[in-house]
Amino acid sequence: MRTFLAIADLWGLDEGQRLLILGCPARSTFHKWAKTAREHGELTLDVDILTRISALLGIHQALVLLHGSEREGIAWLKTPHHATIFGGHRPLDLVTSGTQDGLMAVRRFLDAARGGIYMESMAALDGDFQPYRDEDLVIS
């Protein structure tokens, strides 16, 4: 939890974003966790919270490895990206979407880049992509 708080501070996340990353615990619960962690007390967190923190740690590590500095990695996180998974939004928006899947998607994207299998979006394939709208869905 201490490392989560340090990364959240480094990334400039507000309290709302921190709560979303952690799966929306009550504010009082979050503040209790933060206080306990800062005082080096014992803390028991459930698997969902630990998975979310692990994903954030992996994202941070990948950003440091892929970019020349922490500052460049954070800038990437806060800059709109045109890979299909981000749809022109900032990767940070997916990280702070409140879902574990959003965190894991960014982590998988960065892990793929670290492994050399990342591919820039191709205008010929992705240029005409239009996201589905609610009206396009047929439920029978």
Image (tube, rainbow, N blue to C red):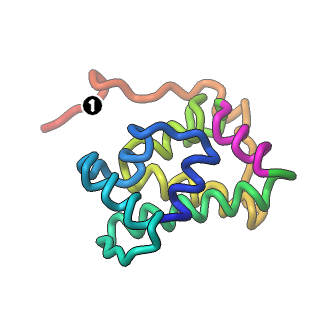
Please, is residue 118 above or below residue 54 in the view?
Answer: above
Q: Is residue 71 magenta?
A: yes
Residue 89 is a magenta residue = no
Q: Residues within 10 Å of mark 1 (few under 14, many from 20)?
A: few
Q: Which residue is mark 1?
A: 137
The amino acid at mark 1 is Leu
Up the image or down, 61 lies above or below 126; here it is: below
Q: Is residue 48 left or right of residue 93?
A: left
Residue extending furthest toward the left: 140
Rendering coords of residue 72 (x, y %): 79, 43
| Quadrant of res 110 | bottom right
Which type of secondary structure does the marked residue at label 1 adopt?
loop
Front residue of 125/62: it is 62
Question: In the image, what residue occupies the spot 75% across and 43% down?
Answer: 120
Q: Is residue 104 left or right of residue 122?
A: left
Q: Residue at x 66, y 63 (%)?
A: 111
Question: Where is residue 36, by image quadrant?
Answer: bottom left
| Of residues 74 and 88, the one drawn nearer to the viewer in this rendering | 74
